[in-house]
Structure formats: C-alpha cells, structure tokens
Image (tube, helix red, strand yellow):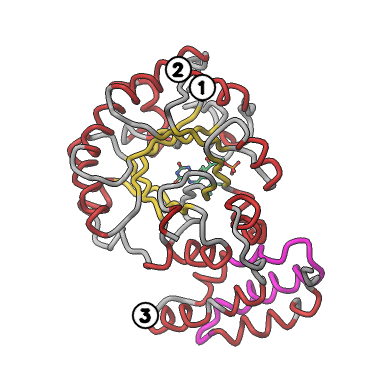
Amino acid sequence: MTDNFSSQRFSIAPMLDWTDRHCRYFHRKLTGDTLLYTEMVTTGAIIHGKGDYLAYSEEEHPVALQLGGSDPAALAQCARLAEARGYDQINLNVGCPSDRVQNGRFGACLMADANLVADCIKAMRDVVSIPVTVKTRIGIDEQDSYAFLRDFTGTVAERGGCDTFIIHARKAWLSGLSPKENREIPPLDYPRVYQLKRDFPALTMAINGGVKTLEEAKTHLMHLDGVMMGREAYQNPSVLAQVDRELFGRTTPAVDLVAAVRSMYSYIEAELTQGTYLGHVTRHMLGLFQGIPGARQWRRYLSENAHKPGADVRVLEAALALVADRIPQEA
Ligand SMILES: Cc1cc2nc3c(=O)[nH]c(=O)nc-3n(C[C@H](O)[C@H](O)[C@H](O)COP(=O)(O)O)c2cc1C
C-alpha cells in the first residue's frame, strides 16, 4: 500500500517495551494502512550497542524509527543507517520526560532548546531523503504558554526544515512526576493543537494523547492531518481492525480477529526456531478479545502457558478455542 507510506493520518505511538518488532508485526495483521513506530531507540544504542537495534520485518511497512538523542552528528549517522535499512521515516523524540532520558539531555527537555532541535532535524534531513519528523508535547514545566509552543514549532520548522509534527496534547513536568504520571496528570488540551495547525497550515500535524475510539479520531481529523493512538491500540488492539475501512476509506472486508491470530503462526514458528519464546510475541496479543466473552480465559491461558519451555502455536490454538466461537460475526 505504497500510496499511504508517508501518511500520518493514523499511527500507533512509539511505546518503549511495547511496540517492539513482534508487536508491530501483529498490529500490521490488523491494519495495512496505519503508520507504525518503533520504540524509542537511542543513538548510543545504535552506534555502540551490541545488538541489532534496527531489526524489523519487511511486513511492518510503513514503519518509522523513533530516535532518542540530541547530538546532530550522531543522529545523522543513525538516520543514514535507518534509511539504508529501509525505514520509511525517522522521528525525533522530544516528548519523553524520564530521568534517564533527561540525563542524556534528550526527550522532552529538548523542548527548552528549539535551536538544538532544529540543528538535529537539519543534520538528519541533510543526509537522508525519507521524512524526518518530531514528536513533542505542548510544553514543559512552566514553559507552557501557547506562545512557547508556537515559537518552538516555528523555529524547528523554519531553521530545521521540519514539516511534520506529532503533538502529545499535554505538557510534561520534568521533575516530580514519573513518565506514567506524565501521561495521565497534566491535562489534555486539544484546542491548543488545533490552534497550532491553524497558525501553521502548511505543516503536517498529528495529535496524540487520550484517543480511544475511531470516532474520536475522526473528530480530530476535522482539524488536523493525523491522529496517533498509543495505549488504547496496545491494550485493545481490535480497534485497529476497523482502521483501514473507517479512516483510510478501504473497502476490504473487516479483519477477522481469529484469522489475524492464525496469520501469525508462520511468523511465530520462524521466530521460535531463532530462539524467541512464544510469550515474547503473544504478550502483545493478550488484549485482542477485550469486551468479548471468553476474553479473560484467552488472556489467562496465554499468560499461564506461553512462557513454558517448548510452547508453540498449539498454545494459541488452545487459547482460541476458549474464545473463538463466542465472537460476534460481522455482517
Ligand atoms: C509503555 C509506554 C511507553 C512509551 N514509550 C514512548 C517512547 O519510547 N517514545 C515516545 O515518544 N513516547 C512514548 N510513550 C508515550 C506514547 O507514545 C504516547 O505519547 C502517550 O502514551 C499518549 O498517547 P495515548 O494516550 O494514546 O497512550 C510511551 C507510552 C507508554 C504507555
């Protein structure tokens, strides 16, 4: 579906420890058009780490690599590697408030230095031809006026050449709140993001934060170019099964959830031979049947059995038997 490769219209948020390559592979079975994001990967991990931090499957496209870092040269090096590996986009994390990230002087604290963010974006844009985007908040600490957000956006767009912003519609407190609290306590301010789009109509702008349904997404799309969904997509992935039809105008049949599970089998079997545990893949599938009778049994059966030695796709078949005939059929 190359026509949507650069589309921001609907995406699944980068989530550390959650949107790993197994998760993304599974999400892709539910929606072909949604833009997927990796977890944040630091430039240090890519450049000095022992593992292959850029590994992904071809089936995941369109997929964006989210980078964490603030050294323009290191970011440029990583962007180049990512483009060579076939990533469709690069995204710079300017929204994560964790202490670890602040110690590395990247993430949300970068909002205080728009010129540095612009330098980072420019350094990457100079060496790759794929889009380079920014994910940020509406403010940090006491720097939370609309003028601050507008100036930040203006600087990163004009000096850095960034034309796409994903805005988590709440500010972050850099001290005193945990990352989890920073996703819950600062209030959401959607109108502020709508205003930003009105002030920068030429920029592509997607909104993030608290979106739980495709109806809500449609409302945002009346004001903005895109919607990024995080926790709801992960915890209740069946919402993704309607995205291609509801948000991308596809006329393909609705995705059958049981068929989606079974379509994972060949991937899982290949992964098992590489030493992956079944549970590494199925942990992302636990919420699939949320709201359907049998969902709890599905979740419990997988949780209890998928990590056992030798566990394979038969565990999934047995778990499906607890839920499959209870799923309402779509007309
Ligand atoms: C477990 C978890 C890990 C996250 N890791 C990242 C990350 O690596 N990079 C990032 O930009 N945001 C990260 N976030 C924030 C999400 O991308 C998103 O901005 C936030 O959850 C708000 O969207 P939501 O209300 O739709 O979940 C994370 C969120 C969660 C729940």
Residue 150's tag is 2
Q: Measured from the top left, where is residue 148 in percent x and y?
A: 45, 15
Give the residue at x 81% y 75%: 326
Residue 156: horizontal and vertical position, in percent?
A: 34, 25
| Residue drawn at (41%, 48%) of the image | 6
Q: Which residue is mark 3?
A: 274
Residue at point 79%, 69% (across, down): 331
Name the amino acid type tagged 1: Leu
The foreground one among 19 and 324 is 324
Earlier in the chain: of badge 2 and badge 3, it is: 2
- 203 vs 314: above or below: above
| Magenta stretch contains residue 286 | yes
The N terminus: image quadrant:
bottom left
Label whose residue precedes the other's in the sequence (1 or 2):
2
The alpha-carbon separation of the residues under discs 1 and 2 comes to 7 Å
Q: Secondary structure at mark 1?
A: helix
259 up-or-down from 243: above or below: below
Residue 212 among those drawn in magenta: no
Residue 84 image-quadrant placement: bottom left
